[in-house]
Amino acid sequence: MRKVVLVTGASSGIGLALCNRLLAEDDGLHLCLACRNLSKAAAAREALLASHPAAEVSLVQMDVCSLLSVVRGAREVKQRFQRLDYLYLNAGIMPNPQLNIKAFFLGIFSRNMIHMFSTAEGLLTQDDKVTADGLQEVFETNLFGHFILIRELEPLLCHTDRPSQLIWTSSRNAKRSNFSLDDIQHSKGQEPYSSSKYATDLLNVALNRNFNQKGLYSSVLCPGVVMTNLTYGILPPFLWTLLLPVLWLLRFLANAFTLTPYNGAEAMVWLFHQKPESLDPLTKYLSATTGFGTNYVTGVKVLSFVSCSLLSEFSSSAWSNTTSPRTGSHIQDPSKIRYYLCDIEN
């Protein structure tokens, strides 16, 4: 039986590079591309099949920024498949990024230059907005929509006879200082992207604690500094023309500058080959590239400690009431996920 791999945000960038690399490793997979734009997804499918004619590649329309779309897409997936072996939670946005020019120029001439370019810490703010579901757009797209997708696909993911894997795309930009349990949507801040990625790291730990015994394992990764549509939106084109040679040179000083989607997918492909039960749930796996272009995977601890203060309360009440398979009427309260993250943070 073919292994089934579902990838969100698979029509371009790192998601599409991942699909190409997975099929190059094993064209016996069934890849399901979960994308918002079906025309772009169809073009991606044609390109994949042109390179890997023996593969099975299917499409499902899903916008993780719309809870109704997630529920509908998940229902379609459940009608097609009996199980999922891998779920790559890759779709994400950084809307209207604005560069802090002062911090940028100060950073260039400081000892923290490499760290600044590797993480964009203190450099970027975003203009967030409220979606039709009444949630902050970055929070819903990067985290909450995927959280609901996992809940909806639980019957396909939880099988004790053979483990399934959740693989989240996080970021080195995930910073504790940008996250608050009192404002998990970051509606009062200016760095919702960083906040959502830190929350992703926390949720990854919590998912393992709740689902490992059911045969479902979760991992989190960072693709590094990759030139995609998301990245190119940060600066004007002429600045990227000036900076790209610098970024290539910085590879000799730091491994975070993967730069291409192919390189950025390194940790994703590495995790595909690992036994999930052998992975450390407190580690974020990082795609890395040497100055001479060699790809490898390294890891960093995402949390120094994990407490159990609210786990039993969440598991018995809020967690079980998070989703409504028919209408999504019970999934629009992100306070449910707040208590889940409290278990990890406190």
Image (cartoon, grey):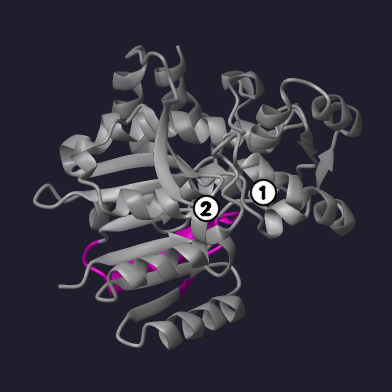
Q: Is residue 62 magenta?
A: yes
Does residue 300 belong to the magenta stretch?
no
**Which residue occupies the foreground of this view, 151 or 199?**
199
Quarter of the image containing the C terminus? top left
Q: Amino acid at mark 2?
A: Gly
Q: Residue at x 36, y 25 (%)?
A: 314
In depth, the one of 269 and 215 nearer the eye is 269
Front position in the image: 38 or 300:
300
Residue furthest out toward the left: 161
Residue at image position (71%, 52%) is: 231
Dot 1 or dot 2: first in sequence order is 1
How would you rate the neighbour count of disc 1 (Cα within 10 Å): few for under 14, some for 14-19, many for 20 or more?
A: some
Q: Position of residue 322 (x, y in %)?
A: 42, 40
Judging by the rendered image, the residue that carries numbered circle 1 is: 248
Residue located at (12% from left, 47% from top): 160
User: Where does residue 126 sit, x and y in percent of width and height?
Assistant: 78, 40
Which span is picked out in magenta? Answer: 60-83
Is residue 331 in view?
no
With 171 as the anchor, is 234 left or right in this view? right
Placement of 34 over or under 98, stated as above or below: below
Q: Is residue 299 visible?
A: yes
Local secondary structure at mark 1: helix
Q: Check disc 1 and give the amino acid type.
A: Trp
Locate the N terminus and report the quarter of the image it occupies.
bottom left
How far across and how far down the image is residue 264, in percent? 52, 52
Find the distance from the CA under tag 1 to the CA under tag 2: 9 Å
Indicate left or right for 98 with 133 as reference: right
Q: Which residue position is annotated with label 2?
A: 293
Circle 2 Cα neighbour tier, 10 Å, few/some/many (<14 / 14–19 / ≥20): some
Q: Which mark is residue 344?
A: none
Instruction: Say whether marks 1 and 2 touch (CB < 8 Å).
Output: no
Residue 55 position by quadrant: bottom left
